[in-house]
Amino acid sequence: MKLKEDEEEEDVSETGRLFVRNHPYTCTEEDIRELFSKHGPLSEVLFPIDNLTKKPKGFAFVTYDIRDKITIRLSSLFFHSCFK
């Protein structure tokens, strides 16, 4: 995807925010919190639910209090390996 001139690519190391996708539809917000909080304190977990089906949409956003590159990378790798 190409960004427009006035847009900037969001850097995870600056925002502390991860986009988590392709998790099982049986996964809950609490599951996400439990998995990612092992790597540092979380400030927010957004876990969208479909308005029509009332089921998870299959993705989430996880934001860490501490914007530490190592913590974020470890969390990303850890989550990826849990749902393979």
Image: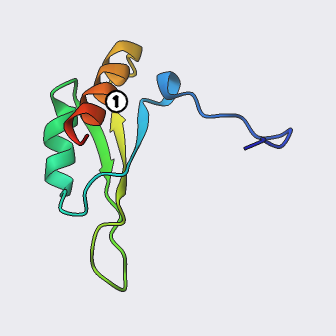
Residue under the image location 26 percent in, 35 percent down: 79
Residue 3: image x %, image y %? 78, 41
| Figure check: 26 above or below 46 | below
Residue under the image location 37 percent in, 81 percent down: 51
Other-residue count near label 1 (Cα within 10 Å), few / some / many at <14 / 14–19 / ≥20: some
Can see residue 44?
yes
In which quadrant will I find the N terminus? top right
How does the figure colour the protein chain or chains? Answer: rainbow
What is the quadrant of residue 75 in the picture?
A: top left
Residue under the image location 78 percent in, 41 percent down: 2
Outermost residue on the top side: it is 70
Outermost residue on the bottom side: it is 52
| Figure check: 5 above or below 71 | below
Outermost residue on the right side: it is 5
Can see residue 65?
no
Residue at the spot of label 1? 76
- Determine whether, in the image, residue 2 is placed left or right of residue 78: right
Return the residue nearer the eye: 69 or 73: 73
| Figure check: 20 above or below 57 | above
Residue under the image location 83 percent in, 43 percent down: 4
